[in-house]
């Protein structure tokens, strides 16, 4: 069983910020729902979801498929940064956490 990452876990990690307007684009395009469906916990506003190392390929697939269809160029930049973090987390064997506030 997995457990939600705690404060100590989060303090050791890197982060990629996303502004509310950009998150709204991902929600409208269904990408946010796909991320939440594939994650442990919830990926959404005021929620926390995470991808264990074995689920990071699913995350990468969502990002490469769903987010790539979004025309907003800010999405491509955000996706590239999250992909880099996801690959680094997978290589280190640690979860990737989405904590939105």
Image: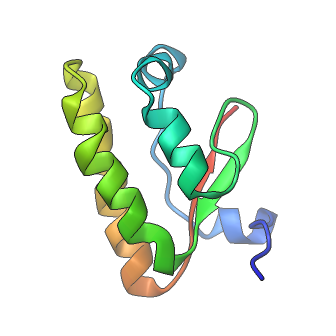
**Image height of 17 relative to 6, above or below:** above
Residue 80 appears in the figure? no
Residue 6 appears in the figure? yes
> Would you say 8 lies left or right of 61 here?
right
> Which residue shows up at 79% across the image and 63% down it?
7
Which residue sits furthest top?
21
How many labels, in total? 0
In the rendered image, residue 8, in percent from the top left (x then y), is placed at 76, 70
> Which residue shows up at 70% across the image and 71% down it?
9
> Would you say 36 lies left or right of 83 here?
right
> Which residue shows up at 39% across the image and 23% down it?
29
In the rendered image, residue 87, in percent from the top left (x then y), is placed at 33, 70
In the rendered image, residue 99, in percent from the top left (x then y), is placed at 65, 45
Q: Nearer the viewer, residue 78 or 31?
A: 31
Q: Quadrant of the N terminus?
A: bottom right
> Would you say 9 lies left or right of 13 here?
right
> Would you say 30 lies left or right of 37 here?
left
> Which residue shows up at 45% across the image and 29% down it?
30
**Image height of 61 relative to 100, above or below:** below
In the rendered image, residue 62, in percent from the top left (x then y), is placed at 35, 50
**Image height of 82 relative to 77, above or below:** below
Where is residue 76, by image quadrant? top left
Where is residue 58, by image quadrant? bottom left
What's the coloring here?
Answer: rainbow
Q: Quadrant of the C terminus?
A: top right
């Amino acid at each position: 069983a997995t457990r939600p990452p705690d404060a100590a876990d989060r303090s050791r990690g890197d982060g990629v910020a996303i502004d509310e307007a950009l998150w709204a684009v991902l929600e409208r395009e269904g990408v946010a729902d796909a991320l939440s469906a594939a994650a442990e916990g919830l990926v959404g506003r005021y929620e926390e979801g995470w991808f264990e190392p074995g689920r990071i390929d699913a995350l990468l697939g969502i990002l490469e498929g769903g987010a790539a269809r979004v025309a907003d160029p800010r999405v491509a930049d955000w996706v590239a940064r999250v992909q880099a973090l996801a690959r680094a987390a997978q290589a280190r064997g640690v979860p990737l956490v989405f904590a939105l506030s």
